């Protein structure tokens, strides 16, 4: 079983965020997942440009930045400057989704689109060939520590079939409620990238937890 692990720093100790990123750099994690929330699209506020710029030099690992915000197209170039490698926007937040995807790519980043639990997979059909990443939200976005929504497994399988039908080479990322109990099931359904936050940072030795998750089969 092969997959990429992208720990979400949303669940890290904010008073020692830099130390958490340094730990991830030394760990077996593949990416660093950064959730940006605006308090409008979701009822929470998190990282902005200054924080991303401050932690970017602390690791060479890919920065996987997920924008849970309205009108994300206003800030594409700023997130590139801050250090994003992949920029994912919410399907539900973009009026002109295809244009936004192209602007992300033109800025020199990989482009991703996330869909909330209530959004059918079919809504991505017309942009799948333009994407580098599809993010399946397996909880309602806004807060860490929520339980995985089982229906997400069907959505992952549906997206996998759609991608095969249209020749898309995008990876499928899953975020929300992932832990030791369901990780294998999620990967078997078709996930290529796993985001885990609470399952890693709530443990006493996150670096060891990452190694354990990467070794699961």
Image: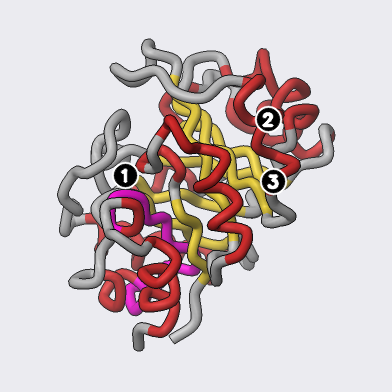
The residue indicated by pointer 3 is 58
Task: Choose mark 3 or mark 1, whichever is in front.
Answer: 3
Q: Nearer the viewer, mark 2 or mark 1?
A: 2
Query: Disc 3 versus disc 2: distance between alpha carbons?
Result: 8 Å
In the rendered structure, the answer to whether residue 35 lies left or right of residue 213 reads: right
Q: Quadrant of residue 209?
A: bottom left
Instruction: Decide: few, some or many residues near mark 2? Use Cα within 10 Å; few <14, some 14-19, many ≥20.
Output: few
Tag 3 near tag 1, CB within 8 Å: no
**Does the stretch in magenta take in 50?**
no
Residue placed most toward the observer, 24 or 19: 19
- Label 1: state its secondary structure: loop
Question: Measured from the top left, where is residue 48 in percent x and y?
Answer: 57, 20
**Residue at point 42%, 55% (across, down):** 195
Which residue was labeled with disc 1?
120
The verdict on residue 196 being magenta is yes
Q: Where, quadrant-wise, is the C terminus in this rendering?
A: bottom left
Disc 2, disc 1: CB below 8 Å? no
Give me the residue at 44% from left, 47% from top: 8
Q: Secondary structure at mark 3?
A: helix
Q: Magenta segment, which residues? A: 187-199
Residue 168: quarter of image: bottom right
The vertical placement of 137 against 182, above or below, is above
Separation of disc 2 and disc 1 at Cα? 37 Å
Q: CA distance from mark 3 to mark 1?
A: 38 Å
Image check: 104 left or right of 135?
A: right
Q: Which of the numbered marks, if any, corresponds to residue 54?
A: 2
């Amino acid at each position: 079983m092969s997959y990429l692990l992208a720990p979400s720093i949303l669940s890290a100790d904010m008073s020692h965020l830099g130390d958490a990123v340094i730990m991830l750099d030394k760990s077996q994690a593949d990416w660093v997942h950064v959730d940006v929330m605006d308090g409008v699209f979701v009822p929470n506020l998190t990282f902005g440009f200054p924080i991303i710029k401050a932690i970017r030099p602390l690791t060479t690992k890919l920065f996987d930045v997920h924008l849970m915000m309205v009108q994300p197209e206003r800030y594409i170039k700023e997130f590139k400057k801050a250090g994003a490698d992949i920029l994912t926007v919410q399907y539900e937040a973009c009026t002109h989704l295809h244009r936004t995807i192209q602007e992300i790519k033109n800025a020199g980043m990989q482009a991703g689109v996330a869909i909330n639990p209530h959004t059918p997979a079919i809504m991505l059909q017309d942009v799948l060939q333009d994407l580098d990443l599809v993010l399946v939200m397996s909880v309602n976005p806004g807060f860490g520590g929520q339980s995985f929504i089982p229906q997400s497994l069907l959505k992952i399988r549906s997206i996998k079939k759609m991608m095969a039908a249209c020749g898309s080479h995008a990876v499928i990322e899953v975020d929300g409620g992932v832990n030791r109990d369901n990780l294998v099931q999620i990967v078997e359904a078709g996930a290529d990238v796993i985001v885990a936050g609470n399952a890693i940072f709530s443990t006493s030795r996150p670096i060891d937890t990452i190694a354990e998750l990467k070794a699961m089969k």
